[in-house]
Image (tube, rainbow, N blue to C red):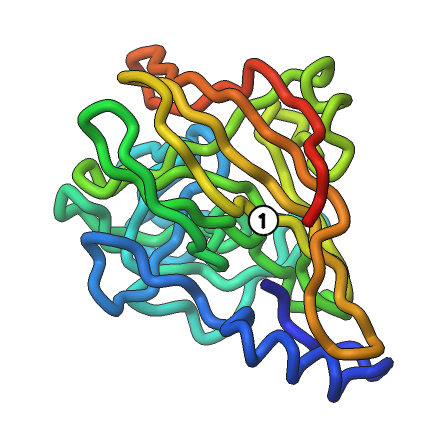
Amino acid sequence: MHKCRVPLIAALLCAAAAAAGAQDYAKLPGFGTAVVGMIASDSVRLRSAPSTTGAVLRSLDTGELAVIAEQSPKPQKIGDGSYYWLHLKLTDGAEGWVYGQFVFRPVGATAAARIGARDYTTAGFLAAESADARGFSSYEIPALVDAAARRALPLKIAQSVASAAPMVGRSPEGWMTFSGDEATEVQIESVKGTGSASAQVLVAKKELDLGDGKWKDTARALLTCERRDDGKYPWFEVTKAETVPAN
């Protein structure tokens, strides 16, 4: 799930991550072996060149997927972070450059489900890491990827609902988030369609047992989700969360 770059027990942690394929970006349906990114904010500018002076070609919104064709030779510092510009090829054929801070990459594609007439694959989309950061990124936005539409539908959760599932977090925009460290991770374990636009999502928190080097469930939550679409883009709303026994 995360990149191992912390010296402490690095050999054990990286070996466990590698065994699970955790450091590889996930392959998503409809994209073959291409490296894919998800737009993780609204009104993100797609530009003609890798610079804030590049012409704005259009705006992109949360959940849009694109093939990452290349990155700029050097990162650019804007505000508090320093990120590479990414050359994106969108699903409708358009292409351009987006500042890397707003492009999350899929990891841990763990489950597939049919919800109504649509097929989905789950993935956690890992936050972009500033080029001058130390350590590793451990912040993800989980989503259900619509295979036919080639679009990610993040999970949105109200604070009152999130309080019933302490292993999940919540972004300022209301998207559900997963966080972890060298020996802790949270992921979607399974999805079950329960209606034409509803599903139950099982989320598990796992911790690395340093004694045997295996990941073990320490907490679980069952989320009831409903597909929403405001005409701008679709997402899944978590309407209920309840803890369930860990394995």
Residue beneath label 1, please? 187
Q: Is residue 229 left or right of residue 117?
A: right
From where the camera sits, is residue 182 visible?
A: no
Note whether 55 is above or below 214 in the view shown: above
Q: Residue furthest bottom?
A: 11
Residue drawn where x is 43% and y is 37% of the image: 191
The spot of residue 38 in percent (x, y) is 40, 46
Note whether 41 is above or below 28 in the view shown: above
Q: Is residue 66 left or right of residue 219?
A: left
The spot of residue 236 in percent (x, y) is 44, 23
From where the camera sits, is residue 110 visible?
A: yes
Q: Is residue 225 left or right of residue 164?
A: left
- Viewer-closest of 104 and 223: 223
Name the quadrant containing residue 39.
Answer: top left
Residue drawn where x is 74% and y is 88% of the image: 11
Number of other residues with Cα within 10 Å of mark 1, as a class: few under 14, some 14 to 19, many 20 or more: many
Quadrant occupied by the N terminus = bottom right
| Amino acid type, callout 1 | Gln
The spot of residue 173 in percent (x, y) is 60, 25
Name the quadrant containing residue 68.
Answer: bottom left
Residue drawn where x is 54% and y is 72% of the image: 20
Residue drawn where x is 61% and y is 23% of the image: 174
Q: Residue furthest left?
A: 93
